[in-house]
Amino acid sequence: MIIIDTHSHIYLEEFDTDRDDVISRAKERGVSKIILPAIDLDSLGRVLKTCHDFPGFCYPLLGLHPEEVKTNYRDVLNQMKPLLENGDSPFIGVGEVGLDFYWDQTYREEQIRAFEIQIGWAIEFNLPLIIHSRSAHRELVDTLLKYKSDSLRGIFHCFGGTQEECEELLQFSGFYLGIGGVLTFKKSSLPLVVKDVPLDRLVVETDSPYLAPVPHRGKRNESSFVYDVVKKLAEIKQLPIDIVAEATTRNAEKLFF
């Protein structure tokens, strides 16, 4: 069984003391690749070093996370874009980008504009777009509709929305729903929502070190735990775990590789 963790931050300092062991445990659980989204300029060095240390296993993304968008966002993006223009660019996607109005809406308009600029990168460089959205569903859909095109593709990271929101997002035919640990939470409504979503529209992720799935909830999340997400998804779909792992891996391969 082969699984791809499509969203992990194992480059963060939370893993500095045992990153090798974390990678080993992931491989033991069938993980074949881990996708590492950046969140800002400072994180890029860590992302690239981790990918350098684990070649052919960890792959980098470049993007400005909505919670990191401030008044200087244009300067930050102007420093990031040349890294994609480089002919030898190692980045296989644009992410983690999007909109987050959960805690603070101070930079609401800046977030939307930064998101639009990075959508443009995904189209210009023909790269998948990894989208973070929290308390911003309507703004997300309205923004994406302006750029709806056959070439735009990606993942709605850490999807946890309603049935209605799910249907709205699936209208973007090049996108997958990223399913993580929330699927396993006791009070989660996500199982009912994803039950009827076709397997060819789903990928799995951990968002390590956050949102560890049951039975690891409350602990530091890591890529080996993506197995528990696949297991739960298989239960919901009433399919063999191998079938679910194969389908979600095929989707991730199609998107990134």
Image: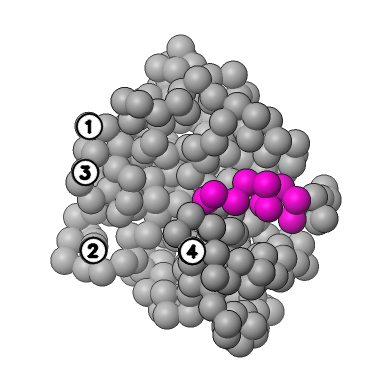
Element at badge 1? Answer: loop
Circle number at residue 14: 2
Q: Secondary structure at mark 3?
A: loop
Q: Is residue 1 above or below residue 78?
A: above
x 60%, y 74%: residue: 89
Q: Is residue 126 left or right of residue 166?
A: right
Reading the image, the residue beneath label 4 is: 104
Q: Amino acid at mark 4?
A: Asp
What whole-number distance in Å separates the C-alpha atoms at marks 4 and 3? 25 Å
Q: Earlier in the sequence, mark 2 or mark 3?
A: 2
141 magenta-colored: yes
What's the amino acid at mark 1? Pro
Q: Which mark is residue 215?
A: 1
Front label number (3 vs 1): 3
Q: Is residue 215 above or below residue 211?
A: above
Q: CA distance from mark 1 to mark 4?
A: 32 Å
Work out whether mark 1 precedes mark 2 in sequence or the reverse, and give the earlier one. Answer: 2
Name which of mark 2 and mark 4 comes first in the sequence. 2
- Distance from label 2 to label 4 (Cα)? 25 Å
Which stretch is magenta? 134-143
Q: Which residue is mark 3?
A: 218
* Membership of 200 in magenta stretch: no
Q: Position of residue 97 (x, y in %)?
A: 57, 62
Q: Amino acid at mark 2?
A: Glu
| Residue at position x 75%, y 51% in the image | 142
